[in-house]
């Protein structure tokens, strides 16, 4: 029984095995061909990569690698040239058009299937432009046979797939269809195009710029009143105010005795001293006044403050001259992308750029250019359709700085492509050619006599068309695209290797300089907003000094001041002064506080002078008594004395009012001197006084002032 079971299982397994083998051999011939083709393609790519690596090991060179010297056959590369000024140019075709007397606005019209010159289809003629010159040289060095095509050769199928006849959109589809190997033009390597075809090593990077029109402003206005504060930033001004306060506090702390700057009522710890110290510090900066010093701690503080004044005043004066001499750049209609959102303004750009903007709310403020034509961005900004535009650095150079471009714009408002480039949808619409090279008016000496009506209608007399356009520096705009060429997979390694070799040798940059930068120098006349933004030394090149520039001044000054404060603390703690009441020197005859009549009759009260024979002990005893009495008793005694003094002063003023002041001149002077000495002795012995004492000080000073002498 078991034997039969094993026999059955063996038969079943054998049937399954032979069935699978039969199915494998029964694979269709078509599927086998597909598999073989796939494997061949992989092997071909591997061979191409290996060949490229071999060329790179030899110095990135690929000279003659697409030419078979044995058979004499050359690999064919089909190149579609997208003509553009200073980018991809055909000088031979332009000359042929002029020789034929053609006066078409498109010149050689290489992109027009009907008007294109025969010279447009000769690859060797496309040796002009900062992209075409190095790339054509690289392709020729490979030894390949080049077939020249133009945008006139765009197929209907590629145009339908891209949605327009725009060669920058249709040419990648021609590569996808297998009819073109290289698209030669200033292409951006966008994500959409990268998903279609391969791209070469980048030729350059086109960073985006935010531009706007300059707004007119008068030479003087309320905003110019604050120009005197421009040499320093707000942070520096705030730090300087802090230095004034710091200096005032330190000088107040060390001023425990009155001097020229701090009266007795303003010495430490009287709060009024802080205000006086700040005032003296401000006057030191504005008028050169300095604090009065009578001790080394105060001298160190004043030394630090003087160092601060010397450096800050010199820096302010030097930088202020720059701000007053240099004319500021013109202000723009907007300031940044955030300002556009905040003020609900509009910004023009193309769809591939708008998708990369990250400022919140900016997408709702974008006006996209029709069919992605960069020239229409400048035209829409000029017509006021938007308040700013986002363009590439190369386009900014050609359209704005050099104003050397020629471009076509549909100017019929009813046309769906209104303000767009290259074409109009409707036949009755008008396609206008704008030539920026002929937009100069009234700027050259020979043209200054021309009336403004003699300028092209699209220009702004007396300047060029876009000379009122300025660049805004906005950190929020961080968008850039690679300039790279759409190519077929098999040809990409050869061209990329050649581009790397040209960059490493410096030859590529030389081509950019000669074909683009040197050929398109800035052309806006002096006095225009664009000229100011292009030329160093005019505009906002005078920069306010920041805290980093002035930090050393503040640190060294503060260090000296703190050293002075430390010295004051050491003197107060380690070297305390024992203050003893001073012995009063001899005074003039004391005043008699008892009034008497004159000539035996009652009349106005007069003071009498005690005889010199009267004992001086009464005066000394009065000055020495407070040192042995409690503070409250001494204060009471002082107030009693001041009360008597006030009575004498009242009588004396009354006597002077009756014309008898002459006989009291010497007495008044004697009283003032004696009162001042007594007041000074008391303050030195006690360090403080009552309100009555301060009143007595003021009156004593008043009486000692004698303008009639």
Image (cartoon, rainbow, N blue to C red):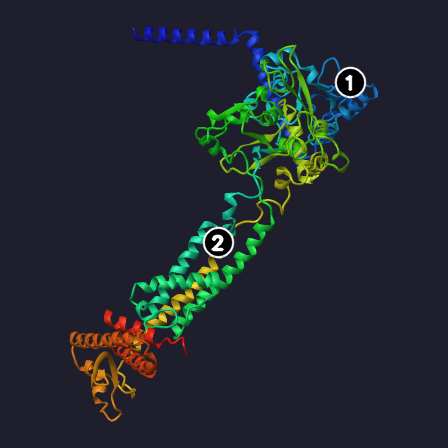
Q: Residue at x 27, y 84 (%)?
A: 582
Residue 184 location (% of width, % of height): 67, 25
Inspect this view and state whether residue 59 appears.
Answer: no
Position of 602 with respect to 249 (left or right) is: left
Q: Rate crowding at label 2 as few (under 14), some (14 to 19) or many (20 or more) other CA atoms within 10 Å.
A: few
User: Residue reaching furthest right?
Assistant: 99
Q: Rate crowding at label 1 as few (under 14), some (14 to 19) or many (20 or more) other CA atoms within 10 Å.
A: many
Please report whichever mark, 2 or 1, sits nearer to the chain's N-terminal start: 1
Position of 254 with respect to 42 (left or right) is: left
User: Residue reaching furthest bottom?
Assistant: 613
For discs 2 and 1, the disc positioned in front in the rendered view = 2
Q: In the rendered image, which residue does mark 2 sit on? A: 548
Secondary structure under the numbered disc 2 in the rendered image:
helix
In this view, the residue in front, 509 or 518, is 518
Inspect this view and state whether residue 269 appears.
Answer: yes
In this view, the residue in front, 144 or 58, is 144
Q: Are marks 2 and 1 in contact (CB under 8 Å)?
A: no
Mark seen at residue 618: none
Q: Residue at x 34, y 83 (%)?
A: 666
Distance (Cα) linking label 2 and label 1: 63 Å
Mark seen at residue 117: 1
Secondary structure under the numbered disc 1 in the rendered image:
loop
Residue 25 location (% of width, % of height): 52, 8
Residue 358 location (% of width, % of height): 46, 31
In the image, residue 36 sits, relative to residue 217, either above or below, namely above
Residue 355 location (% of width, % of height): 50, 26
Q: Quadrant of the C terminus?
A: bottom left
């Amino acid at each position: 029984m078991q034997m039969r079971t094993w026999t059955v299982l063996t038969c079943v397994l054998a049937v399954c095995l032979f069935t699978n083998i039969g199915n494998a051999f029964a694979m269709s011939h078509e599927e086998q061909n597909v598999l073989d083709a796939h494997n061949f393609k992989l092997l071909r790519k591997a061979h191409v990569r290996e060949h490229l690596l071999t060329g790179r090991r030899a110095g990135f060179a690929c000279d003659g690698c697409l030419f078979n010297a044995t058979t004499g056959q050359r690999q064919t590369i089909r190149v579609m040239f997208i003509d553009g000024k200073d980018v991809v140019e055909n000088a031979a075709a332009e000359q042929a058009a002029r020789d034929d007397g053609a006066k078409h606005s498109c010149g050689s019209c290489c992109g027009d299937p009907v008007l294109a010159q025969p010279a447009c289809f000769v690859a060797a003629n496309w040796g002009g432009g900062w992209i075409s010159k190095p790339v054509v040289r690289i392709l020729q060095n490979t030894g390949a046979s080049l077939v020249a095509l133009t945008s006139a050769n765009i197929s209907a199928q590629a145009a339908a797939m891209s949605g327009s006849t725009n060669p920058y959109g249709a040419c990648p589809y021609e590569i996808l269809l297998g009819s073109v190997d290289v698209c030669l033009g200033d292409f951006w390597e966008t994500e959409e195009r990268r998903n279609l075809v391969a791209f070469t090593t980048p030729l350059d990077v086109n960073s985006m710029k935010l531009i706007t029109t300059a707004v007119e402003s008068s030479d003087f206005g309320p905003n110019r009143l604050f120009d005197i504060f421009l040499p320093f930033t707000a942070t520096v001004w705030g730090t300087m105010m802090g230095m004034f306060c710091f200096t005032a506090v330190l000088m107040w702390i060390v001023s425990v005795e009155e001097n020229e700057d701090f009266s007795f009522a303003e010495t430490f710890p009287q709060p009024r001293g802080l205000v006086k110290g700040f005032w003296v510090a401000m006057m030191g900066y504005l008028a050169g006044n300095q604090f009065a010093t009578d001790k080394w701690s105060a001298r160190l503080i004043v030394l630090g403050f003087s160092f601060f004044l010397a450096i800050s005043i010199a820096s302010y004066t030097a930088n202020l001259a720059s701000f007053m001499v240099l004319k500021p750049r013109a202000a723009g209609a907007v300031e940044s992308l955030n300002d556009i959102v905040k003020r609900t303004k509009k910004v023009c750009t193309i769809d591939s750029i708008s998708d990369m903007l990250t400022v919140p709310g900016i997408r709702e403020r974008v006006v996209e250019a029709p069919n992605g034509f960069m020239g229409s961005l400048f035209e829409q900004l000029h017509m006021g359709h938007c308040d700013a535009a986002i363009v590439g650095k190369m386009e900014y150079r050609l359209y704005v700085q050099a104003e050397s471009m020629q471009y076509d714009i549909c100017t019929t408002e009813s046309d769906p492509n209104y303000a767009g480039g290259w074409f109009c949808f409707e036949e009755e619409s008008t396609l206008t050619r704008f030539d920026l090279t002929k937009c100069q008016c009234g700027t050259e000496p020979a043209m200054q006599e021309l009336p403004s009506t003699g300028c092209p209608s699209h220009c702004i007399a007396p300047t060029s068309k876009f000379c009122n356009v300025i660049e805004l520096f906005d950190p929020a705009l961080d968008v850039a695209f690679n300039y790279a060429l759409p190519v077929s997979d098999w040809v990409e390694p050869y061209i990329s290797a050649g581009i790397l070799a040209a960059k490493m040798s410096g030859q590529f940059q030389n081509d950019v300089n000669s074909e683009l930068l040197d050929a398109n120098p800035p052309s806006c006349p002096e006095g225009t907003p664009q000229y100011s933004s292009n030329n160093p030394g005019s505009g906002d090149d005078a920069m306010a000094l920041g805290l980093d520039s002035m930090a050393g001044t503040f640190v060294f000054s503060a260090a000296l001041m703190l050293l002075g404060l430390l010295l004051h603390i050491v003197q107060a703690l380690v070297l305390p002064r024992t203050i003893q009441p001073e012995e009063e020197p001899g005074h003039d005859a004391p005043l008699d506080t008892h009034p008497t009549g004159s000539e035996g009759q009652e009349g106005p009260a007069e003071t009498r002078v005690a005889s010199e024979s009267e004992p001086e002990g009464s005066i000394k005893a009065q000055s020495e008594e407070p040192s042995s009495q409690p503070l409250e008793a001494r204060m009471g005694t002082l107030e009693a004395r001041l009360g008597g003094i006030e009575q004498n002063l009242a009588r004396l003023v009354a006597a002077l009012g009756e014309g008898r002041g002459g006989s009291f001149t010497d007495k008044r002077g004697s009283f003032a001197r004696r009162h001042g000495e007594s007041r000074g002795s008391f303050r030195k012995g006690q360090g403080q006084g009552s309100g009555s004492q301060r009143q007595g000080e003021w009156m004593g000073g008043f009486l000692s002032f004698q303008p009639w002498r």
